[in-house]
Image: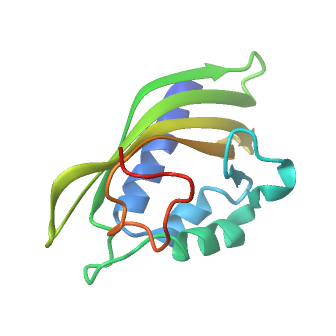
Amino acid sequence: MADAAREIENLLYTYAERIDAGDLEGVADLFVHGRILPSADAPADRAIVGRDRVLALYRGSTRLYDDGTPRTKHVTTNTIIEVADGASTAAARSYYTVFQRVDDLPLQPIIAGRYRDTFHRIDGRWWFDSRTMIVDLVGDLSRHLLFELKGRTAR
């Protein structure tokens, strides 16, 4: 049986696998008991809470192509996981880099930043409690997002 840190690490990678497959329903399933925070300093009332709201967020923001995918690869690295003594809550810090290639865009990194995640264990299974995505570097997101990332320009 995997230890708590490995199970949480697998949850992080499952998120990347599902988003790259265009499985937005599967991404939302990871947040049945969780929320996404739009920024590190966002007030609690701005959180996107629960599966249905997370699904709406991804459907309204992620460009999918004819093959059903966003044609991206989300790479999660430098993960540090801290499991609480009771092993029912945990936190993780990690980096992400998203690569994309489409017909008119050669393979390139399009965004990089940090995830700040918390987790809780429910009925023996780890779930996202919260995810905060911190943007550090922005490239050409025009073929990935359905909106312009406010306050960010390509660097």
Image vertical order of residue 154 relative to residue 116, above or below:
below
Residue 1 appears in view: no
Seen from the viewer's position, the closer of residues 24 and 139 is 139
| Residue at figure coordinates x 72%, y 24% from the top left | 87
Residue at point 63%, 37% (across, down): 117
Position of 124 compared to 6: left or right? right
Could you say where residue 97 lies in the image, as x and y percent from the top left? 36, 42
**Which of the 4 image quarters holds residue 30?**
bottom right
Q: Is residue 55 visible?
A: yes
Which residue occupies 25% across, 79% down?
A: 67
Where residue 15 appears, x then y in whole percent?
A: 47, 52
The quarter holding residue 132 reads top right
In the rendered structure, the answer to whether residue 95 lies left or right of residue 50 reads left
> Residue at the location (41% across, 51% down)?
16
Q: Is residue 140 left or right of residue 122?
A: left
Instruction: Answer above or below: position of 39 versus 78.
Output: below
